[in-house]
Amino acid sequence: MEELAREVAAAREIDPDVFAERVAAETEELKGELEVGTFDNPQAILGLEHEFYAVDGRTDVLRRVSVPLLELIGFEKELGLHNAELAGRPQPFGPHGLAALGHEARAVVRAAHEVSTRNEGIRLVADGFWTVPPVGETAAEYLAASVEIDGVVLSPNMPPSVRYQVMSNTSLYEPACHLETANVTLETPTICPGALTSSIQPHYQVPAAANLPDYFGYALRVAGPLLALAVNSPLFPPSLYDADATVESVLVEDHLENRVRLYEATMNDANRPAKVRFPRDIESTAAAVDRIAADPPIAPKLFDGGDRFDDRFAHLGHKHGSYWRWVRPVFGGASESAANTRIEFRPLPGQPTVRDAVSLVAAFAGALHGLVATDHPVRDLP
């Protein structure tokens, strides 16, 4: 891990002023492209990101997912070594698009299950929290494990990636890494507790970028009801409960939904404005871009350019990577013709079946479409 520690240390030395200058220039360029319609599209598009965690196929204990297995099944790494993420292909809004989204996710997940079971004896599971830690460790030990090398604190249970590890090692932003509920107290040296959770993230691509504020406002107002429908993991791993916690106190005093609170308690800096939170309404699409640009960076990074259209906004995109609002706008596209404006809906926990996940995508997208089409007065609620 010495090489990783050196890379993390080097990432802390990037000049934040140079990074800020590039972000400012890209912000103006992106707003110019929005104004001329580059990010408009003929119809609404749906997408789905679905996180899983790995468990032993026989004993159900948590298992780490190897990089070769991730590559084999076509999933992406996430915050914990036990995580794997499926990114579905975008589909048109409507019954056929939803069906295609579901069929693709079901086929990919089934194939991933078969390969992971055959090759490594693991199953991919999806719900809000895992509760059974790896063999030989408690959940508290697993989440708090760390190694310090030359002043850099690394989690051995997070990917050996600067992107993840630097978040626990920068003076620009210091995640609290402290959770306290009625029956749980957890404090760790890294952000690894964020990997206790898994999520689904529906995406809704708006047809006209100028209309983003309307869709965004409705997305904020459906967040609570949809989260209430989606919760499924009220319990923490047993070792995280306080010594004086009882079954009765856990059932009576604890919430049915803990993922939002856990992530906010882990990732937010107690001395700076919260990055993980539900945002305010936005007045214009340009204001949404300005809001991302104004968000404090965690670990600036300098880019040399690339072949994609959205590489022109690489520094702003890097800052967006730590713009952890529960509902957030996304501006992207590999080419100018594929440029799009979408809403990423992040508060929902992982779902135990593909059908559950796609149903929530349908509910989210259908609500946005219907509420905007009818100019529903719920938009006027604070």
Image: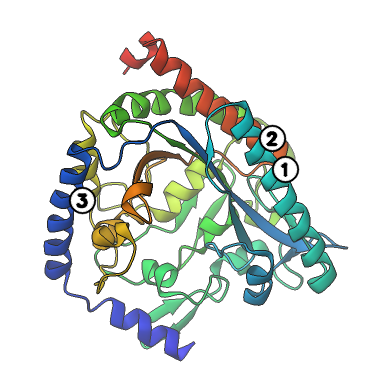
> Residue at coordinates 33% horizontally, 67% vertically from top-left?
307
Bin the neighbour count of mark 3 within 10 Å (Cα to Cα): few under 14, some 14-19, many 20 and up. Answer: many
Element carrying mark 1: loop
> Residue at coordinates 31% horizontally, 51% vertically from top-left?
336
Q: Which residue is mark 3?
A: 293
> Residue at coordinates 27% horizontally, 76% vertically from top-left?
12
Q: Position of residue 286 (x, y in %)?
A: 19, 38
Residue 356 marker: 2
Residue 175 marker: none
Q: Which residue is mark 1?
A: 352
**Residue 229, above or below 46:** above
**What amino acid is labelled 3 in the image?**
Ala
Query: Is residue 346 shown left or right of residue 281?
Result: right
Q: CA distance from mark 3 to mark 2?
A: 35 Å
Q: Are marks 2 and 1 in contact (CB under 8 Å)?
A: yes
- Closest to the observer: 15 or 60? 15
